[in-house]
Image (cartoon, rainbow, N blue to C red):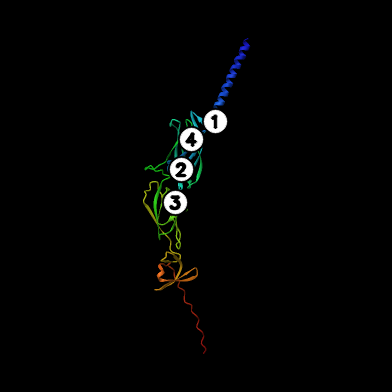
Amino acid sequence: MLQTLCMTRRRAIAAAFCLALVATVVGAKDKKDREKNQPSIVMFWPDQTNPVLRLTFDPFSRLASYNGQLSLGSRVLVENLSGKRIPQASFTVYLMDKDKVRVGNGTLSFSDLEPGQQARLSFQVMSVGLPVTLSLTAQADSGGNPVSLRTVPLKVESVPPGAALKVDGHDVGVTPVTVHMPIGGHTLSFSKEGYATGTTPVDIKPDEAPGGSITFELGGLSRDNVELRNGSVLQGDVISVSMTSVMIRVDGQDKMLDRNQVKKIMLVQREVIQQAPVVQPATAQPQ
C-alpha cells in the first residue's frame, strides 16, 4: 500500500513538472512569436509633411537580458528624401511603450547619403521592454537646427562671371549663384571656356552665419576672345584690327568680321621673343 502511494506521488510530481515545462516552452514560443509578428515602425524626419528622411525600423529582436534589462536589435533602412546630400547625421532614438512611457534610448548615426539614396544600418539598444512607438531627436546647434543637416547660403562669384560651378563634383549652376552649403569641408571648381580652370576649398562651420560670399578669379585667357553683338564669342588669334574690320584666325582659318559686328575684344598677353639677327657672310669681290 505504502509503495503504491509513493509511486502515485512520484507520478504526480513528474506530471506536474512536465506540465510546467510544457507551459514554459509554450510561453517562450508565444513570446517569440509575438516579437516576430510585431510590425515595422516607419518614421519621417522632421515630419511627414516635409520629410527629409524616412526611417524604417524592422521588428526589434531580443539579443540578451541582464538584471531586468533587455538588449534589443533592429535593422534600420534610412532613405534620403531630400534633393541634397547629407554628409552626416546623428539621432537619439527614444523607445516608448504602449502608455508612451520611455523604456530605453540609443544613438543612430550615418554619413554620406546622396539624394534618393538608401542605407541599411544595424541599431542596438538597452531597454526594459519592447517598444511600441519611437521618437527621434537630432543633434542640434544653439538655434535648434540639426547641425549635420543644416545648410548655409553662400553667394559664389567669379571674375569674369559666367563660370560653370561645381561643389564637390556636382554641378550647381553658373556664377554668380547662391549655393546652400552643408556643414563641413567642400571643394569649389570653376570652369569657363577660354580660361584656365581652378578650384578652391571652402569650410562651412556649424556656427557659420548666412549672408557670406566668395569671389574666385579665373586664370588668364588661353586665346584671344572676340565677343559679337549677337552674344556669340569667337576664340582664336586676332590678326589685325582696323577702323572697319577685325580679322581673327580660328582653328587655322582666317575670318574677316565687320567692325560693327564686334562688341568687345579681349586679347591674351603674349611674350615676344627677340631673335638675334642672322648675319650673312660677305661675298668675296673679285680683284
Camera-nearest residue between 42 and 66? 42
| Residue picked out by circle 4 | 125
- Frontmost residue, 47 versus 212: 47
Q: Earlier in the sequence, mark 4 or mark 2?
A: 2
In the image, is 5 to the left or to the right of 223?
Answer: right
Query: Residue 8, position in %: x, y?
Result: 61, 14
Asked which quadrant contains residue 22, the reply is top right
Mark 3 → mark 2, Cα distance in angstroms: 23 Å
Q: Of marks 4 and 3, which one's residue comes earlier in the chain?
A: 4
- Give the amino acid type for the residue marked by disc 3 in the picture: His
Q: Is 208 located above or below residue 191 in the figure?
A: above
Checking the image for residue 33, the label placed there is 1
Q: Quadrant of residue 100?
A: top left
Residue 236 at what x, y percent from top left? Answer: 46, 67
Q: Which mark is residue 53?
A: 2
Give amino acid for label 4: Val
Numbered mark located on residue 186 in the image: 3
Looking at the picture, which amino acid does disc 2 mark? Leu
Q: Residue at x 50, y 44 (%)?
A: 118
Q: CA distance from mark 4 to mark 2?
A: 21 Å
Which of marks 4 and 1 precedes in the sequence? Answer: 1
Density class for disc 3 (Cα within 10 Å; few <14, some 14-19, many ≥20) is some
Ranked by sequence position, the earlier of labels 1 and 2 is 1
Q: Amino acid at mark 1?
A: Asp
Label 3's element? strand
Q: Residue at x 39, y 52 (%)?
A: 154
Q: Nearer the viewer, residue 55 or 165?
A: 55
